[in-house]
Image: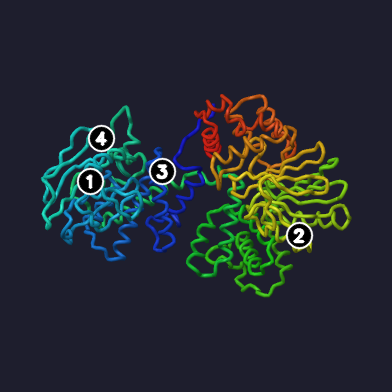
Amino acid sequence: MVQYIHTPWRDRAELLRVRQQFYPSPPAGAPTNTAEDEAEQRHAVSRVSMWMQRGGCPHLVESTALLVAAILSDLHDTRTGASSSSYAIRAAYSAAFSRYFGIGVLRPKVSPLPPSSALVQVQKSQCSVSAPPDTAGDLVASPDSFSSFASATAYTCQKMGLCPRRLGIGGEQAQCRGGGRAKIGCRTKGLPTPSQAVLMQYQDPTYGKRFVTGLLDSQQDKQRKMSMYAVAKTIGLPATFVELRHQATHEQLPSLLKLRAAAKKALVWIWHYYWKNLPGDESSTTEDKADACRNLLIQYLTEEEQSTSKKSLQKRLRKWDQTLILQVLGGIGESSEDSKLLLRSLQLSRGILDGSFTTSPAARADGSQPRSAKDIEAIRADLEKSRDELEATPVGVRDKPLQPQSRTSLETRGTGKSDNYAYLLVDDQSKDAVIIDPANPEEVSPVLKQAISAGKINLKAIVNTHHHWDHAGGNKKLRNDLGTPDLPIIGGKDCEAVTKTPADGEGFNVGNIAVKGIHTPCHTQDSICWFAQDGNEKAVFTGDTLFHGGCGRFFEGTAEEMHTALNEKLTALPDDTKVYPGHEYTKSNVKFGISVLQSEAVKKLQAFAENNKETQGQFTIGDEKQHNVFMRVEDPEIQKATGKTDAVEVMAKLREMKNNFK
C-alpha cells in the first residue's frame, strides 16, 4: 500500500522555491544586502507562516523563517534608524533560538510611550521589531502579515491563546488561570498613568519550542533521557547554540553582537543539516521544469549586462541542471530572429559546455569579444553544433520525427521535442488542414513545407489548446517559416498572436471535418479542447487538460473547474471519441493511478504504457472513464483512498496526492 505524506506546501517545487528565497547563495548565513533578495526572503517568511498555520511544517523550516525574519527586522531598524531598544531586538533573536515569546505593550490613549520602550512582535513564523503604534489602551497582538500591526483587547488576547508570563513597568504580576487555550487570561490594576507603560511577555502555547529546543527534543532518546549537550553532539549541533538557548530562556538576554553572529551561523548549520539534503527537482514534472527554466532563461538573456537583477538571475540559473538548460536554450535560439538573443543563447551554451560559465553570462571560452554583426544563420549553425554536443549525451527524453498515421477521412500526425505532441488534422477530400500546437517550428516547418509544395495539404490555420509556450510558443515563427504572415491562429485569448477565439461550443470546419471548441478552464483559463468529427470518426485534442490516465495541474484554476471540464464536459462526448493529449505522460500517470485504484482497466493501461512509448490516440473517452482516476471521482474505492465523498473534494485531494506522489 502506498503511503502518502501530507505536507503544508502544494508540491516539492514550492518548498524548493522557498529554499531558494531563504538562501540566494548557499551556504550564506545571513540575508544579502540586495533589495531583491531581501524582498524574496520576506515573501518566504510569509509563505512559511501560512504553512505553520496549516500544520505539519518541519521544525527546521519554521526555525529558518524565524531566524531570517529576526535578521531582516534588525537590518531594517539599523538602516532606518528606528528607535527600537536594543532589548527589543535581542528579544526577537532570542525568541528564534529558544521559546516562542512576545512582548505586548499596554498603554493609555494619551501621551506617547517613553523613548526607551519598544514592541517585539513574535508571529507564528517570524519575529519583527518595530516601535509601538498608537493602540489606545489595547494590547498589541501578533498580526498575520510582516511589519504590520493589529490591536486587540485583553479578552481578544485571551481567545488567541496568548499566555501572559509577567508584567513589567507599572503593572502587577500576571495571573495564568488554567492550562487550556480558552481559559488563559490576565488582569492588571488598571491602565497605567500617562507616563507609564506596561510590558507583558507571553508565550504562545500552540507553537511552543523554537530552533534549539525543538530540534534537540525531537532527537531525544525516548528510552534513556540524555542531556541537551549529548543530543547536540550526536547531530553535530555546536554546543554554543545550546548555551545560547539556556541563556536566552533562563538568564539575561545575550548581547546583540553575540545574537547576530549566532543567527548567521545557525542559518549556515540549518542549510547543511536540512536544506542542502532536500531532493532536487526530480518530483517536478518535465512540463513544470522546462516551463520554469525557459522563463528564467528569457529573463536572464534579455536583462542588461552588469545589472543587479542579472547577477541574481545568474545565481539562480547555476542551480539548474545544465542538460535541461542546454535543451531549452536550443529551442529559444532556434525560434528567435532577435540577433542579440541568438548571440547570448550561443554564448551561454558555449560557456556551459566548456565550463567557463562563471562570472559573466556572456563570457567566451577564448576570452575574445563577440562579433555583434555575426550573421544569424551562422549563429544558428553554432547553436546546432552545440545541440549536437548535447545530444551526444543521453538525457532521457525523446525527440521523434513527424510520422503520419493513416486515417480514412480524419488524419492526425504527432510530433514533439521531449514529450510534446503536435497534430496535423487533414481532410482527405479537400486536403484542407490545420496544425494543432506546433510549439517546435524547426521540426514542423519542413514537413509542412514539403506537404504544401507537393499539393498534399492546404494549410488553413494554426490551432492552440492553451497559451503555454510549449503549445503556442511557435505560432509566429511557424508563420514566418511558411511565408504566411496572415495565417489565422485559432485558440484561447492568451495564445501567441491569436486571431480568433471561438465561444464555448462554437468552432470551424476543416473541409468536411467539423471542429468544435470546448472551453475547459483550469490548467490555464484559456484552455480549449477541440472535438473533431467526420462521419463516424471522432477525436478530441485535449492539450494539458486531459491525459491518458491523468489530467493537467490546476495552474490557473480550481478543482471545481477541472471537475467540470473532465466529468461534465469531456465525459459527455461519445465514448468512441479518441483522445489526443498534449504530452506523453501515460506511464507516470498510471503509476499514480494504480496506487489509488487497482482495477483491471488501470492494470491494462499500465501494461500498455510499459510496452509502448507513444500512446496518443490509442484510447477513447470511454476508456478514460474506466482507467482515469480523475474521471472516477464517484468511485467508492477512490473516495476511500482520498477520504472524501464530495466529487470536487475528491478531485482536489487526488491532485494533491498526485503532486506529492513519488
Which of disc 2 and disc 1 is earlier in sequence?
A: 1
* Spatial separation of the CA atoms under disc 3 and disc 2: 48 Å
Which-is-in-front pick, marks 3 and 1?
A: 1
Q: Position of residue 111 (x, y in %)?
A: 15, 60
Which of disc 1 and disc 4 is earlier in sequence?
A: 1
What residue appears at the point 79 percent right and 47 percent down from the top-left corner? 425
Give the crowd class for mark 2: few <14, some 14-19, many >=20 residues within 10 Å: some
Q: Residue at label 2? A: 487
Residue 191 makes an appearance in the image: yes
Name the mark on residue 51.
3
* Spatial separation of the CA atoms under disc 3 and disc 1: 27 Å
* Spatial separation of the CA atoms under disc 1 and disc 2: 67 Å
Q: Evaluate if marks 3 and 1 touch, with contact meaning CB atoms under 8 Å apart.
A: no
Q: Evaluate if marks 2 and 4 touch, with contact meaning CB atoms under 8 Å apart.
A: no
Q: Evaluate if marks 3 and 2 touch, with contact meaning CB atoms under 8 Å apart.
A: no
Residue 613 makes an appearance in the image: no
Which-is-in-front pick, marks 4 and 3?
A: 4
What residue appears at the point 64 percent right and 69 percent down from the top-left corner? 340
* Spatial separation of the CA atoms under disc 4 and disc 1: 15 Å
- Element marked by disc 2: loop
| Residue 460 left/right relative to 128 | right
Name the mark on residue 182.
4
Amino acid at dot 4? Ala
Looking at the rendered image, the quarter that the N terminus falls into is top right
Amino acid at dot 2? Leu
| Residue 519 left/right relative to 10 | right
Which-is-in-front pick, marks 3 and 2?
A: 2
Amino acid at dot 3? Trp
Which of disc 3 and disc 4 is earlier in sequence?
A: 3
Q: How is the image coloured?
A: rainbow
Q: Residue at label 1? A: 153
Give the crowd class for mark 3: few <14, some 14-19, many >=20 residues within 10 Å: many
